Image (cartoon, rainbow, N blue to C red):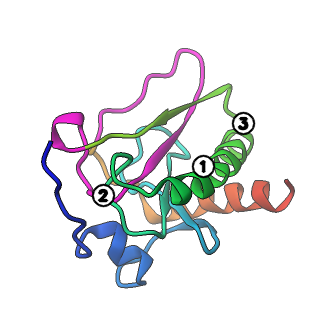
Amino acid sequence: MSAATYEGSNIFAKILRGEMPAHKVFEDDIAFAFMDIMPRADGHTLVIPKAPCRNLLDIRAEDLSALMPRVQKVARAVKQAMQAEGLTLQQFNEQAGGQVVFHLHFHLLPRWSGVSLRPPATQMEKPDVLAAHAEKIRAALASA
């Protein structure tokens, strides 16, 4: 296993620094959650730590333990806001494991019976649709 280093030029680091736009649904001192611009399901949300780390394999244990309640909180809001029947959590590590952006991130995918996920990274969603989904999720978070 190689000890690859964190690259602060990745797209999620740029989003955290405000250098790239994102449809934010949640932010505190530990985590940032936003809409995936190429969603595999309506309401597809990403949750990332503010701590710089490549993935699950190199995040500090204390940072991970602080992050996971936020992942759960946002997951509950996504499911409620999108009136989903279930939710799939995905997380990939290193290129061979399917990771594309090398900043730890969790995919929250609302699910409905009989509705397949769309293929990954195939179509960008319209900004107004992402904004509407983000608003629903923020409302669910506010009422939690």
How far across and how far down the image is residue 61, in percent? 50, 53
State the extent of the magenta-drawn residues as a range: 94-120
The one of 124 and 96 positioned closer to us in this rendering: 96
Name above or below for residue 107 compared with residue 27: above
Judged by depth in the image, the label closer to the viewer, 3 or 2, is 2
Rounded to the nearest whole Å, what is the CA distance between mark 1 and mark 3?
A: 22 Å
Residue under pointer 2: 54
How far across and how far down the image is residue 53, in percent? 35, 62
Residue under pointer 3: 83
Q: Main secondary structure of the magenta part?
A: loop
Residue under pointer 1: 68
How far across and how far down the image is residue 141, in percent? 76, 57
Q: Quadrant of residue 80?
A: top right
User: Is 111 on the left or on the right of 36, as rendered?
Assistant: right
Asked whether residue 113 is drawn in magenta, I would say: yes
Q: Earlier in the sequence, mark 1 or mark 3?
A: 1
Q: Amino acid at mark 3?
A: Gln
- Quadrant of the snapshot with the N terminus: top left
Which secondary structure, mark 3? loop
